[in-house]
Amino acid sequence: MQTSVEEADRAKEELEIPPIALQDTSPNIYNGDEQQIEALQAIFGPILKFMKLGGIYFGDTSFKRLGQPSTTGSKKKISIARIYCIVVVGSFWFSLAMSFVSLYVEGFSVLQNVYSLIGFCMWHFVTAVVATTCLFVLPVNVGKKSRFEKFVQNLIERRVDLATLKLHTRKGLILAIFILVVSTLILLVALQWMPDLTLASYKPWNDWYGFRVFWLASMIFSCVVWLLPTLLFCLTCLVLERQFDLFCKRVSLVDSHQTLDITALKKKHQKLCETVSLADKVFSPVLLEVISITIPLLCFNFYTAINPPMTSEGGLMSFSIIGAVYWLLGSAGILSLITIFGSRVNEKVRKLRSNVKI
């Protein structure tokens, strides 16, 4: 009983602390938040490193530069990672151009070719757009603050315990790497045994073997765009859920017979809403692009699964169906994860509004 009273007193004192006392306007604002930075680096750092390898992120992955004053020289510096990302994203747009040219040249001659090439167009379009968006909203770098950097800085100022979420990052990365390996194997088998089902087999790219190699590399990199931004969104939703859970727990620990500082509670709730708003600015463009294009892409994948294209090797038709079903289920899984984690955060917001009348 005494322990419960002590926890309630600590929660009350924490709620009644003015927000100004939690902030420091000195240049070394983050010197006292090294533990929080390490926790955020353990959650987001591994994903950002893999995104950097995939060519859709060129910023800092350790968050060491957060809070450092920007200089004019740092803005003019062009890193090798940025050039690498530009090359990778440029390959996505070139693959999109290849699919449009093939659709115009011979896509309308056979009905099955139309569906296959439109599917290629939509796939390369969503990967190119999402990858380009990631280069603008995610990088944490010296210079102009990105949307994701503002969100991370807000989490540091909130000082919420996020150590329990490190395990989710490892599980998510293991699953993403497994799916990436399986996708790569499927692409290699398709290129080797079923070249008629690849984009490079259509005119005017079918005469050059180099286009097949380029298309294979572009598809492998596009799988990174397919998986990792979704994983980053899911982990961000878990971070936001943690914020709501701790806020509700602190409020519930305060005894009903004690006086609660409503003003302090409102300010903390406002800070929580600000965190959600910053996360929304980061992921709303990516989610719009993924959902609006993946839904019609599912329809074309479903048609390809039940009406596989004719190939020169009739005995390998079963693999064509398996491949189409794999991409169909994968795209559906991506949409399901986005919907589930997004709805969970929305449910936390609704529950907080109904339980805490502010």
Image: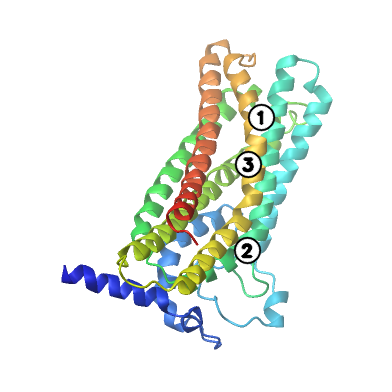
Task: Pick the quarter of the image with the N terminus.
Answer: bottom left
Report crowding for label 2: few under 14, some 14 to 19, many 20 or more residues within 10 A (C-alpha). Answer: some
Q: Secondary structure at mark 3?
A: helix
Can you identify the residue that label 2 sits on? 147
Whether residue 124 appears in this view of the structure is: yes
Against 312, residue 332 (above or below) is below
Eyeballing the image, is 330 above or below 40? above
Labels 1 & 3 near each other (Cβ < 8 A):
no
Q: Residues within 10 Å of mark 3 (few under 14, many from 20)?
A: many
Question: Residue 297 location in percent, x, y?
Answer: 64, 30
Q: Is residue 312 left or right of residue 352?
A: right
Which amino acid type is marked by label 1? Answer: Pro
| Residue in front for this viewpoint, 201 or 32 | 32
Q: Nearer the viewer, residue 117 or 220?
A: 117
Residue drawn at point x = 37 percent, y = 66 percent: 161
In percent of width and height, residue 74 lies at 67, 78
Q: Nearer the viewer, residue 340 or 258?
A: 258
**Other-residue count near label 1 (Cα within 10 Å), few / some / many at <14 / 14–19 / ≥20:** few
Q: Which mark is residue 290?
A: 3
C-alpha span from label 1 to label 3: 11 Å
Of callouts 1 and 3, which one flags the residue occurring earlier in the amino acid sequence?
3
Colouring scheme applied when the structure was drawn: rainbow
Q: Is residue 188 visible?
A: no
Looking at the picture, which amino acid does disc 3 mark? Val
Which of disc 2 and disc 1 is earlier in sequence? Answer: 2
In the picture of the structure, the residue carrying the numbered disc 1 is 296
Structural distance between the alpha carbons of marks 2 and 3: 19 Å
- Residue drawn at (81%, 32%) of the image: 101
Secondary structure beneath label 2: helix
Residue at image location 67% in from the left, 53% down from the top = 133
